[in-house]
Image: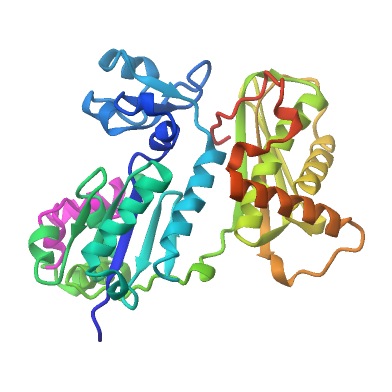
Amino acid sequence: MKERVILHCDANSFFASVEVANKPNLKNLPVAVAGNPKKRTGIILTKNHIAKKYGVETGEAIWQAKLKCPNLVLFAPHYKIYEYYSAKLKEIYEKYTDRVESFGIDECWLDVSDTYKFFGTPKELADKIRNEVKTSLNITISVGVSFCKLFAKLASDMKKPDATTIIDKRKFKEIIYPLPITDIIGIGRKLEKRYNQLGITKLGEITQVPDEILKKKFGILGIELKQKLLGYDYDEVNLFDNHVKPKSVGNGTTTIIDVYSRKEIMDVVTMLSEEISTRLRRDGFIAKGLAVGIKTATFEYFHKSKLMNITTNNSKDLVYESMNLIDSFWQYNQAVRAIRICAYNLSNANIVQLNMFTNIIKTKSIDNALDKIRKKYGYYSITPAIKINNTKLDMSRIEV
Ligand SMILES: [Mg+2]
């Protein structure tokens, strides 16, 4: 079997980098993105490498981070912009191969086995992609190069920011085997403990354990991981249009101050629906199921879901259907702190019958026009009218 060339491209401090991408005056300052720096959810979500040097950690409270780094520049998260950059990154990667598989918002595997020769060596291609990202998007990525997905991902973690790391067949044992087992995605605290019980703390030690013991303790996956660590990882990078179908697309937000009225709640629902519909259209899905959740100021949580009479990826439909659902169980007599909407029961948008009872052609073309404008001029070139002068809405959000 021909040796494969797999790249794993991982954006460095993605949220924080996007925030400073077009603000050169912040380039050399410590920056973090935190859940609503102004009011409620004051926790560091991500930080740039300068903030990291001060000891700022993900998950800690803003006041703790500020003690270590008094001049820390804070931003509320802007998920729409991150998604926009995520799509732009993918566009760049897809210039070099049709085999691009997303993993989360800021990571992709690229199988360049058949294409890298057009651009030089694998390292030259990795460097070229890195430079293209830097010059066109003003953010940096780390690229891992290897003969399989697992090692490419480990490699991209080794040097940050803006670096290429190669793990080839001759050297992988000396590079990978001394690493702690928790460096592998999927080995969390629980699994770590169970490996520890066998006296295993380093990745290389897994390769020494007999298959029977691994099977007994971890099932077939235990043996699979051992095989991969021995260099037998044949997992394929998915074709870009063949990506794993998500089960649902959801979005939630915490408002800066409590909202009460139907109008205020509908404003929030409109914001959320617009983002969900953008994501659905981007990924080629339409939804049949819809769920809404409302968290009160006293932290009670109410939710309801339904299958709609239509299938849609249109923002107006989602607003209409969500408000219908909310009307069916909500009295608008309590302070609302957070709202979440989730579209589920997804199917491929291209194989759906036209629904005769919605003005699907018209609304579809409006949404497509929006997508086109944004593609050309950037996400914020066009925003829903309700955002203007609405002091209660904030782009910052947490999962409800
Ligand atoms: Mg990253």
Q: Is residue 156 visible?
A: yes
Residue 142 relative to residue 333: left or right = left
Occupied quadrant, residue 393? top right
- Which residues lie in the magenta part? 178-207
Q: Residue furthest right?
A: 357
In the image: residue 112, left or right of residue 83: left
The reply, left or right, for residue 129 in relation to residue 40 is: left
With respect to residue 185, does 98 lie above or below?
below
Q: Quadrant of the N terminus?
A: bottom left
Q: Residue at x 80, y 22 (%)?
A: 261
Is residue 216 found left or right of 99 in the rendered image? left
| 365 to 379, vertically: above or below | below
Q: Quadrant of the C terminus?
A: top right
x and y percent of residue 183 in the render?
23, 51
Residue 202 location, quadrant: bottom left
Up-down relation of residue 165 to residue 43 (above or below): below
Residue 189 painted magenta: yes
Residue drawn at 76 percent across, 69 percent down? 352
Position in image of residue 199 (x %, y %): 12, 54
Q: Find the residue positioned furthest to the left.
A: 174
Q: Nearer the viewer, residue 243 or 218?
A: 243
Q: Position of residue 350 (x, y in %)?
A: 70, 69
Q: Verify whether residue 153 appears in magenta.
A: no
Location of residue 117 (image quadrant): bottom left
Q: Residue at x 35, y 46 (%)?
A: 134
